[in-house]
Image (tube, grey):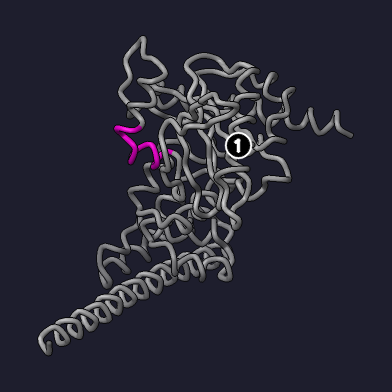
Amino acid sequence: MSQEVEKKLFKDLAQIIEKGKQQVVAQVNSVLTLTYWHIGKKINDHILKNERAEYGDKVVATVAKELEKQFGRSYTLRNVRRMMQFATIFPKIQIVTPLVTQLSWSHFVILLSLKNNQSRIFYAQKAIEEKWSKRTLSYQISRKAFERNEIATLQITEEFTDVQNTFKDPYFLDFLGLKDGYLEKDVESAIIKELELFILELGVGFAFVERQKRIQLDGKDFYLDLLFYHRKLKRLIAIELKLGEFKPAYKGQMELYLKWLDKYEKQEDENSPIGLILCAGKSDEQIELLEMHKDGIMVAEYWTELPPKKELEQKLHSLLKEARERIENRKFLEK
């Protein structure tokens, strides 16, 4: 009996020590990152006092050389320029201080490479909320998570503001390895097989509940393709997979499933279910006329193959621009 007590005591003490080590590492990292910000800010302020551009280039190179000589490789000319950029992009210490306790310098280096401040804020928030490693952050940026989230968020109305930053459009399902001529059941089976990757694509918070959820109405059986639960939203998420273009009839089908889930599956402390219809293609005008966003139904495309990087960026940029224009037109007509 005493041995078991001692083992438990040792285990508890080991956990305390490990937790303490993690806190020390986190504190050292945050202090170091804040130091880099102060260095960047000091150099930027010094250069601003002298209007000659060539003076700025010369002093940065000289200072970096001396810093590297005395404090090591962390202060190479390249890194010092990053520190200056860091202080320029995040100019207020009040904003930087809480961020450095949750993001490492490696995270910031990746964020500095982004040209759009809005996307930088999005990725910083996501990295904090979902505890992304620097590798995951780079992966999400390469997969254009910000642009796809923006396109999807434009469908959301005031009644469902809590689901912002939850959905994407389009969804990238290239990891399923589907060949030409695949069927709807093939997509579903591939998703179940690669469930971990599919949930990674959906985002943090999604938990798989059931495949082919049976819904009984008037003695007839209906089957919902995939049912998930989102822990943060406290909502069931009904997902329907469609092979071809979106059809208006899909709206009625999803409304039926959502009403049934709301009546028979939703718990007392949960919010109303939301539907996500994934199609190989869609008409944005049809979706807008059907006002599906008012019924808590999202429609998104899924791509089983991705174009080259440059083409992908252009395509998503075009989709985002079109989505924003449609929303502006709708607001104008509603006035």
Q: Which residue is mark 1?
A: 260
Q: Which region is colored magenta?
A: 192-201
Q: Quadrant of the C terminus?
A: top right
Answer yes or no: is residue 233 visible: no
Answer yes or no: is residue 163 visible: yes
Q: Is residue 235 left or right of residue 205?
A: right
Q: Residue at x 62, y 39 (%)?
A: 153
Q: How many marks?
A: 1
Q: Residue at x 69, y 19 (%)?
A: 286
Q: From this view, report whether residue 189 is shown above or below residue 228.
A: above
Q: Quadrant of the N terminus?
A: bottom left
Q: Main secondary structure of the magenta part?
A: helix
Q: Residue at x 57, y 63 (%)?
A: 91
Question: Can you name the residue that lies furthest to the left here?
Answer: 3
**Horizontal and vertical percent position of residue 81:** 42, 56
**Horizontal and vertical percent position of residue 106:** 36, 57
Q: From this view, report whether residue 218 is shown above or below residue 83.
A: above
**Horizontal and vertical percent position of residue 280:** 49, 19
For residue 199: magenta?
yes
**Which of the 4 image quadrants contains residue 176?**
top left
Check disc 1: other Cα within 10 Å, few if <14, some if 14-19, many if 20+: some
For residue 298: magenta?
no
Q: Which is more toward the observer, 236 or 218? A: 218
Mark 1: amino acid? Trp
**Horizontal and vertical percent position of residue 29:** 35, 70
Q: Is residue 162 left or right of residue 197?
A: right
